[in-house]
Amino acid sequence: MADNPVREVRCTPSPTNPLFLTVTIELAEHVAQCCINPEAAFVEFIGEGERLKANFQLRDHRPGYLMEASVKLPAPGTYAYRVVAKILDRTLMREGTYLAAW
């Protein structure tokens, strides 16, 4: 079985506004561009009475590719999130909680 295609999934707030997030899927260097479908990948945040969904964009990066999505949360608070992507015929599903502080 091949190595895990995903090195890391992270949510990074903007240094100037903690409600602006970049969600990044960092791919392993053995993942070829042809095995990535960013159009079918998304992140969804649910909380504070809102449901926000953003699609990923593929970014060239070394040693592997990055998939990034930008999200603007409407208010400080606690949000559940879900990241869904298909990479190398595997479904990536990550869920967690994000605290947006002000």
Image (tube, grey):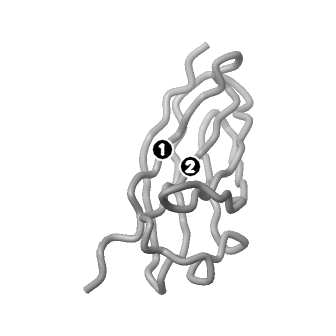
Give percent across and percent down for residue 91: 46, 77
Residue 63 against residue 23 in the figure, above or below = below
Residue marked by disc 2: 24
Examine the rendered structure and indicate whether residue 78 appears above or below residue 45.
above
Return the residue nearer the eye: 44 or 37: 37
Q: Residue at x 59, y 55 (%)?
A: 61
Q: Are marks 2 and 1 in contact (CB under 8 Å)?
A: yes
Q: Amino acid at mark 2?
A: Thr
Task: Give 81 or 7, whichever is nearer the viewer.
Answer: 7
Of residues 66 and 42, the one nearer the viewer is 66
Q: Which residue is mark 1?
A: 10
Q: Residues within 10 Å of mark 2 (few under 14, many from 20)?
A: many
Left or right: 20 as drawn, with respect to 13 = right
Residue 12 drawn at (x, y percent) = 55, 34
Q: CA distance from mark 2 to mark 1?
A: 5 Å
Q: Nearer the viewer, residue 63 or 86?
A: 63
Three-letter residue code for mark 1: Arg
Mark nearer the N terminus (2 vs 1): 1
Residue depicted at 48% across the width and 44% down the height: 10
- Residue 41 coordinates in the image, percent (x, y): 63, 68
Vertical arrangement, residue 69 with respect to residue 33, above or below: above
Residue 75 is drawn in which quadrant?
A: top right
**Corner quadrant of residue 2:** bottom left
Secondary structure beneath label 2: strand
